Image (tube, rainbow, N blue to C red):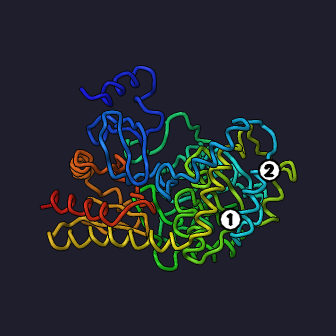
Amino acid sequence: MTKSEELFQRAVKRIPGGVNSPVRAYGSVEEAPRFIQGAVGSKIFDVDGNEYIDYIDSWGPMILGHNNQQIKEAVIRASENGLSFGCATEKEVEMAEFICERIPHVEMIRMVNSGTEAVMSALRVARGYTGKSKIIKFAGCYHGHTDAMLVSAGSGVMTSGVPDSAGVPKGCTQDTMIAVYNDLKSVECLMEESNDQVAAVIVEPVGANMGVVPPAEGFLQGLRDLCDKHKALLIFDEVITGFRLSFSGAAGYFGITPDLVTYGKIIGAGMPVGAYGGRREIMEIVAPAGPVYQAGTLSGNPIAMAAGLAQLKILWEDQDIYKRLYQKGELLFDGIRKIFKEKEVPYQVNSVSSLGCIFFTKEKVTDYASAKTSNTKAFSDYFQYMLNHGVHMAPSQFEAMFLSDAHTETEIQATLQLLQDYFA
């Protein structure tokens, strides 16, 4: 028995399912989770001494690679002054200024502690600002585990086979309306059905929690136009895409301006942090400036701010990183497409820059329904092979692969060779 297996046996006795987040569970791939000892660059190491090329990147924020020296030094310096004060600090002001001065659609920003909290708060602000109550989300898009958003939520919910969640009262979701990703007509119908009572449309600008599903041409601009027409706010959930597709996230990458945007742990270089921001007139209704209440003792934690600011400064000063990430994405995902074509493998490869996913289905994947046609048993067999040959990926058909600036061409070619061997 490996040490990971021993730890998992201990964990299931004290932690529900043996993990502190369902996306870490390996049940769907018939394995025990690998317990991680450490990581550096593009590599991650488990407690049994195994080394893997890591394509999880802590679910995206390790865009520079693991254990970056500059970020680590910033954390050590900040921790010498203390870990938490529950008071205002200079670093959170610096962080707010740094982001707002460089991202045109973020004039004001509020720090929180997670992507879930950022979305929850942004939705409350949208309702407070518009005076409307209904929210439109898309089937398969995940926006955290708040009650109102656990409807057709994708990601870990899809993997476990639970479409929603027990413990969520019906009243919490009665104002959440579900549209079809990449289908503007479905959004327009809901807008009209609601008698213009939609406060906001929230969307992952690149679907990344039902696997990776890029927006169809004109889809995001269509959402912008519909929100303007019906006086609703457009919220981009950029917990996955923020500061990854470009410094301005998917908004900058696709050239679409949202009213509000939410960020996750990438602004803390992987530490527990999130944020929401947008136009000044909207954000000024947040307490204590306005009537929409939201608070958090750990919001703007000085250690997280130090780590995040160090990472964002690197990304800002070396924006060729985004060109390199795009090129690495082309190398990996186009390489997989080439293998599939040569070997007449009928599966799909979706990608946007450094995000990508293989779907084990013959159908083109453009939304939640088509993503669900994937053969999860085929994914499980593939996952086990790759893991046992030193490639670390999310244990779910419905998660993204993430590339970092630390991934080398040699490592990507090694990954492609493993794929070629497997599908041979």
Q: Quadrant of residue 299?
A: top right
- Whether residue 39 sits left or right of residue 376 in the image: it is right
Q: Position of residue 152 (x, y in %)?
A: 48, 51
Residue sitting at x 74%, y 68%: 101
Disc 2 designates what residue? 90
Q: Amino acid at mark 1?
A: Asn
**Whether label 1 touches label 2, CB < 8 Å:** no
Element type where label 1 sits in the image: loop
Element type where label 2 sits in the image: helix
Q: Position of residue 93 (x, y in %)?
A: 78, 54
Residue sitting at x 21%, y 48%: 385
Q: Is residue 135 shown to the viewer in this render?
A: yes
Q: Quadrant of residue 400?
A: bottom left
Which badge, 1 or 2, comes first in the chain's sequence?
A: 2
Q: Quadrant of the C terminus?
A: bottom left
Q: Amino acid at mark 2?
A: Glu
Q: Quadrant of the N terminus?
A: top left
Disc 1 designates what residue? 195
Residue closer to the observer: 92 or 251: 92
Kindly identify which numbered label has been placed on residue 267. Answer: none
**Mark 1: few/some/many CA within 10 Å (<14, 14-19, 20+):** few
